[in-house]
Image (cartoon, rainbow, N blue to C red):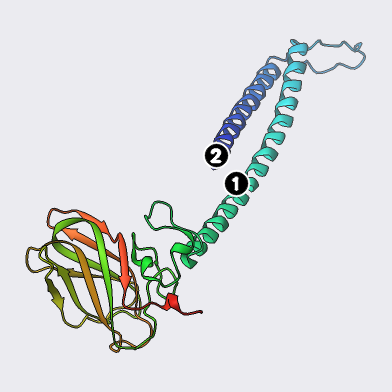
């Protein structure tokens, strides 16, 4: 719709240019006709008045009428152009308002992001672990329902168990923390024989939310499961995670397919 409006504006500009060209052409035609008028000798007292015919008078009148019509058409085209500009501005304001509304609905979790792989509706509880599945969609810091939050703030040890589609040789784990980051204490994976092995352990550096933490895996491990441990006493308030991405040594990248948690604020009635 916006493109068609812009095309109409271009067509109108073309019409304006043609009208200006016509007006210039008509003005030149009138000037040429006036130059061809004969010079009239000064009148002598007592001489009878003699009417000197104007050459090409009909052509001059026709040119004058053409000029008047061109000016009328030009004025009408200018008014249409002004109206079209107003419509374009109103349309841009409307589209901006719609975009803001859609963004707000998606941010609140009431509208799913198309193609993000996250199931819509009641299957995605606010602050439930299922909010960690699919790409990151909590793009601003805050206590937002589009990320997972544990049942209680500052309650101690919590965990997220994350499953991905395809087992790969692990290179990195990217954890998107959207609120009060810094509580992650350990990351583990599970080998083919079922053993749980630690791939990172320590204290996160300080950072402002939202932040994407990159944890490098120091050894080759073929897996499609990652477990994220948190000590929620490290950072006051709810420590919330929006998404986790698994990067393979082959360059492949994949988001969480299924997530479970030690607890979730989705069990509360907020």
Is 73 displayed left or right of 260 in the figure?
A: right
Quarter occupied by residue 135: bottom left
Of all residues, the one furthest to the front in this rendering is: 193
Q: Alpha-carbon neighbours of circle 2 within 10 Å: few (<14), some, or many (≥20)?
A: some
User: Closest to the observer: 175 or 157?
Assistant: 157
- For the point 70% across and 27% down, the residue is 70
In the picture of the structure, the residue carrying the numbered disc 1 is 88
Quarter occupied by residue 129: bottom left
On screen, residue 6 above or below 193: above
Q: Earlier in the sequence, mark 2 or mark 1?
A: 2
- Distance of label 2 from label 1 (alpha carbons): 8 Å
Is 248 displayed left or right of 156 in the figure?
A: left
On screen, residue 101 above or below 210: above
In the picture of the structure, the residue carrying the numbered disc 2 is 6
Discs 2, 1 touching: Cβ within 8 Å: yes
User: Closest to the observer: 27 or 247?
Assistant: 247
Percent across and percent down for residue 8 are 59, 35
On screen, residue 91 above or below 258: above
- For the point 43% across and 64% down, the residue is 124
- For the point 62% across and 22% down, the residue is 25
- SS class, disc 1: helix
Q: In which quarter of the image is the N terminus?
A: top right
Is 78 displayed left or right of 46 in the figure?
A: left
User: Closest to the observer: 158 or 200?
Assistant: 158
Percent across and percent down for residue 185 are 21, 81
Tally of marks? 2
Is residue 143 in view from this perspective?
no
Percent across and percent down for residue 241 are 33, 72
Percent across and percent down for residue 142 are 42, 76
- For the point 44% across and 75% down, the residue is 266
On screen, residue 33 above or below 169: above
Instruction: Specify the label residue 105 is tagged with.
Output: none
């Amino acid at each position: 719709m916006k493109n068609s409006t812009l095309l109409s504006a271009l067509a109108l500009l073309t019409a304006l240019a043609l009208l200006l060209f016509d007006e210039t052409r008509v003005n030149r035609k009138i000037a040429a006709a006036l130059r061809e008028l004969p010079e009239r000798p000064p009148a002598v007292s007592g001489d009878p008045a003699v009417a000197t015919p104007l050459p090409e008078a009909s052509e001059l009148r026709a040119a004058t009428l053409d000029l008047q019509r061109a000016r009328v058409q030009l004025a009408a085209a200018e008014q249409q152009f002004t109206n079209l500009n107003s419509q374009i501005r109103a349309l841009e304001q409307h589209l901006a308002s719609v975009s803001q509304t859609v963004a707000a609905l998606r941010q609140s979790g009431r509208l799913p992001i198309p193609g993000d792989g996250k199931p819509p509706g009641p299957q995605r509880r606010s602050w439930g672990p299922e909010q960690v599945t699919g790409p990151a969609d909590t793009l601003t810091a805050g206590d937002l329902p589009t990320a997972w939050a544990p049942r209680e703030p500052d309650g101690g040890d919590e965990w997220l168990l994350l499953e991905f589609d395809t087992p790969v040789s692990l290179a990195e784990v990217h954890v998107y923390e959207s609120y009060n980051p810094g509580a992650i204490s350990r990351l583990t994976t599970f080998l083919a024989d079922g053993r749980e092995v630690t791939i990172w352990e320590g204290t996160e550096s300080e950072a402002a939310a939202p932040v994407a933490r990159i944890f490098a895996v120091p050894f080759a491990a073929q897996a499609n499961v990652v477990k994220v441990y948190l000590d929620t006493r490290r950072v006051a308030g709810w420590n919330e995670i929006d998404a986790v991405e698994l990067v393979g040594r082959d360059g492949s990248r994949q988001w969480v397919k299924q997530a479970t948690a030690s607890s979730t604020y989705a069990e509360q009635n907020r």
